[in-house]
Amino acid sequence: MREPRENRIGGQLAARGLAPNKRFGQNFLTDEGILDQIIDAAELSPEDTVLEIGPGTGVLTRRIAEQARRLVAVEIDRGLAGMLQEEFSGDPRISVINADILKTDLREVFADVTSGSVKVIANLPYYITTPILLALLPQTELFSRFVVMMQREVADRMQAGPGNKDYGALSLIVQYYALPRIVTLVPPSAFYPQPEVTSAVLLLERPDRPPVSVEDPERMFALIRAAFGKRRKTLVNAVTGAPQLGIDADRLKQALADCGLAGNVRGETLTLADYAALTAHLT
Ligand code: SAM
């Protein structure tokens, strides 16, 4: 009989004097069915270049390596990175870099790839899911598709639209760059050790064209962040209370009227298209 995968992972780590490290968000995936769903959602072809974030003990890495042309895996844990570097040392298509993904110059790593063609596949470390995606999503010249496991609550926020309690600045920023869709929910029992929360695999696909046209996305995001910073207030009160934006109430009311929006709207009712239009009228 096959040994349960959690025992194998525990044994593999122990043989190297390693143990799951909570500080690095190490919850290793043990469920084969979920691995299949992640790989299917990535729609890998033999032409693909892939970035894997946090390969851990390599369960996803091996599956990606079977199908992709090239794979770069970035792992912060020196012991785990060393284990995978040994395993893949004979395969020039696979590079395992021992580094913090947030401090890695990915433009340099992928200097040789064709524009916008790298796929990102990861069972992300949950403590930095949002910073990682907010750093990678704007790099449209590099990344085309993301299949990423995260805490369900964060996936819900990324996918939410107006009228949903989870709708917020994160939803709008993510949806400016990509179309999110939850592929599957994942129970704690799919991991070793088990996390305390339910997880979700989120697919983020780049649309052919950006959903809205904005000259300065950062300015739109600043407006969105101010609007949701005080989500119970009207947009006018929330935004004019954020002095760093330098938008006074009269100007904002005029912009709302120009966009056909009521003067007392709350930010949480507006769509990405509304925010894009408002930003254009305020520039
Ligand atoms: N991919 C493996 C799996 O599915 O079993 C491990 C996933 S585990 C949730 C997250 C992985 O990310 C761990 O291996 C952890 O060491 C690594 N990690 C945590 N912080 C990181 C960072 N800042 N940069 C790169 N890797 C990181």
Image: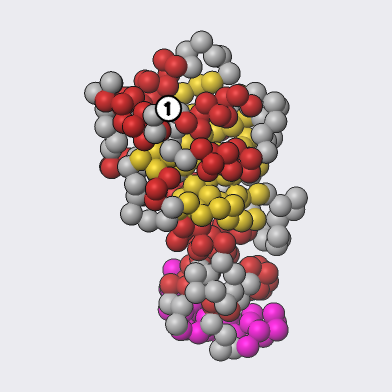
Residue 91 image position (x, y, % from top left):
54, 14
From this view, report whether residue 278 is shown above or below residue 90.
below
Is residue 204 at all visible to an observer of this figure?
yes
Residue 129, horizontal then vertical, whole percent = 44, 49
Toward the left, the furthest residue is 17
Total count of labels: 1
What residue span does the magenta drawing correspond to?
233-262
Q: State whether residue 12 is above or below residue 171.
A: above
Instruction: Return the x and y of residue 261 as percentages of the image width and height.
Output: 66, 84
The residue closer to the viewer here, 53 or 136, is 53
Question: Badge 1 is on which residue?
Answer: 1
Q: Is residue 95 magenta?
A: no
Tell which residue pokes out farthest to the right in this image. 208
The quarter of the image holding the C terminus is bottom right
Observer-nearest residue: 71 or 277?
Answer: 71
Q: Pick the residue in front: 275 or 6.
A: 6
Q: Residue at x 48, y 51 (%)?
A: 186
* Magenta stretch: helix, strand or loop mostly: helix
Q: Residue 125: name its quadrant.
A: top left
Quarter holding residue 104: top left
Residue at 37% across / 20% down in the picture?
Answer: 82
Left or right: 208 in relation to 16: right
Mark 1 Cα-neighbour bin, 10 Å: few <14, some 14–19, many ≥20 = few
Please report the residue visible at 70 percent of the width from the left and 84 percent of the height from the top.
Answer: 260
